[in-house]
Image (cartoon, grey):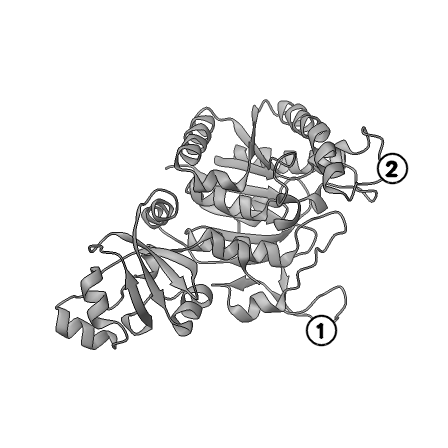
């Protein structure tokens, strides 16, 4: 049986001490938990923050720097220290590590993401643990866009991961802030992420040392779900915490439903490898159904079409001049123009097409731009 592929994302809040510096005791526990997971025959890719926390003290800063220049300088010093700490700890389990520094523009460059995929595939084949971090020293907006959250979602999709585990300092998703409202209710399981759930979540980070927050994690989870990857957001203690999460006993929120391997692969192809043949402009109802309800695009929601394309080609789905998704069409451009705004049963009768959807949800992924720009 093929190994399950797991991406584990560890944020700054789960790696730092009370002064904002790197906590080697926490890092040692994370390492032991990943080693235990690998011994259970899982493939593991680690997305780890912590370079700034690891480096600021050696630069002479008394506390974590707040300026971009200070953070980037600390990251330049700290990245080597961070990867060395992981390397030393994994070596005690006779496990080999590797380092990849990425920026989000890698995922919009065909040659670059193909190279990243090939490298990660070879490392996993050789039983090496890839440790990935955002390249903090050159990626200015990483310091504000989510503390590696979106990076973990994109990597999960790129490598056809079965599961994304996002470890943080809060044990899951609540309908209110549990730190300030004792009536807050925790969500143990969510099949999808609705607009209401996203709006319940504040922008602020739960930790003063993290750059992300629960909203950042949910936007990343939304992207991962679109790519066919289930997500866990929560916390854990002990060397068996990741095993417990995979055994459905984690202290957090499980998001999403099971996807087949073929579906994950198809969504990954649409997201990262397909050529765009045109665009379909949709109305508000269709936009919200796609973004927040995991629905297909139906003819009734189509407003206009750009370009000439055939059945099976991939198009952008646009709302208010913003690309919200892309997907593989069940109708050619001519038929979509002819039937836009019509009820599905009428379209099926008049076109002799057996599919009611213009784009089925299983052949649709949310755009990376939509997730980055969501407010």
Camera-side residue of 36 and 294:
294
Residue bearing mark 1? 183
Residue 323 percent location from the top left of the image:
42, 58
- Identified at 38% across, 46% down, the residue is 268
Camera-side residue of 259 and 74:
74
Residue 216 percent location from the top left of the image:
60, 55
Q: Is residue 372 visible?
A: yes
- Identified at 28% across, 75% down, the residue is 341
Residue 204 percent location from the top left of the image:
70, 58
188 horizontally vs 3: left or right: right
**Could you classify mark 2 by the number of other residues whose Cα lies within 10 Å: few (under 14), some (14-19), or many (20 or more)?**
few
SS of the residue at dot 2? loop
- The residue most toward the right is 62
**Could you classify mark 1 by the number of other residues whose Cα lies within 10 Å: few (under 14), some (14-19), or many (20 or more)?**
few
Camera-side residue of 314 and 34:
314
Figure quadrant of the N terminus: top left
Camera-side residue of 84 and 335:
335
Instruction: Tally the numbered discs.
Output: 2
- Identified at 32% across, 45% down, the residue is 274
Question: Which callout, 1 or 2, points to the residue nearer the camera?
Answer: 2
- C-alpha gap between disc 1 and disc 2: 38 Å
Do the numbered discs 1 and 2 sit on residues whose CB atoms are within 8 Å? no
290 horizontally vs 87: left or right: left
Image position of 39 with respect to 155: above or below: above
Sequence-wise first label, 1 or 2: 2
Name the image quarter holding residue 103.
top right
SS of the residue at dot 1? loop
Residue 309 percent location from the top left of the image:
22, 55
Residue bearing mark 2? 62
């Amino acid at each position: 049986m093929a190994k399950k592929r797991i991406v584990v994302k560890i944020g700054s809040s789960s790696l730092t001490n009370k002064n904002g510096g790197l906590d080697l005791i926490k890092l040692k526990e994370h390492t032991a938990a990943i080693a235990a997971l690998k011994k259970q025959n899982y493939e593991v890719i680690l997305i780890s923050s912590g370079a700034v926390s690891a480096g600021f003290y050696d630069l002479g800063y008394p506390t974590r720097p707040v300026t971009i220049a200070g953070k980037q300088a600390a990251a330049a010093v700290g990245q080597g220290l961070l990867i060395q700490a992981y390397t030393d700890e994994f070596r005690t389990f006779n496990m080999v590590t590797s380092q990849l520094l990425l920026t989000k523009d890698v995922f919009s460059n065909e040659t670059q993401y193909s190279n990243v995929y090939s490298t990660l595939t070879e490392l996993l084949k050789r039983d090496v643990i890839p440790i990935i971090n955002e390249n903090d020293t050159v990626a200015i907006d990483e310091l504000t866009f989510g503390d590696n959250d979106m990076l973990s979602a994109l990597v999960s999709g790129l490598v056809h991961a079965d599961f994304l585990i996002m470890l943080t300092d809060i044990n899951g998703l609540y309908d209110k802030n549990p730190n300030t409202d004792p009536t807050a209710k925790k969500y143990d399981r969510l099949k999808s992420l609705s607009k209401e759930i996203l709006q319940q979540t504040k922008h602020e980070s739960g930790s003063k040392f993290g750059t992300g927050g629960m909203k950042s994690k949910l936007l990343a989870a939304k992207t991962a779900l679109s790519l066919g990857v289930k997500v866990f957001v929560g916390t854990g203690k002990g060397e068996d915490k990741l095993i417990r999460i995979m055994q459905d006993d984690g202290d957090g929120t499980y998001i999403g439903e099971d996807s087949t391997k073929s579906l994950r692969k198809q969504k990954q192809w649409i997201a990262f490898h397909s050529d765009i043949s045109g665009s379909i402009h949709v109305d508000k109802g269709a936009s919200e159904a796609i973004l927040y309800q995991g629905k297909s695009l139906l003819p009734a929601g189509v407003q206009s079409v750009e370009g000439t394309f055939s059945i099976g080609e991939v198009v952008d789905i646009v709302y208010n001049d913003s690309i919200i998704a892309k997907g593989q069409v069940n109708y050619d451009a001519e038929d979509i123009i002819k039937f836009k705004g019509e009820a599905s049963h009428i379209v099926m009768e008049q076109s002799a097409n057996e599919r009611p959807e213009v784009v089925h949800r299983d052949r649709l992924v949310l755009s990376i731009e939509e997730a980055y720009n969501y407010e």
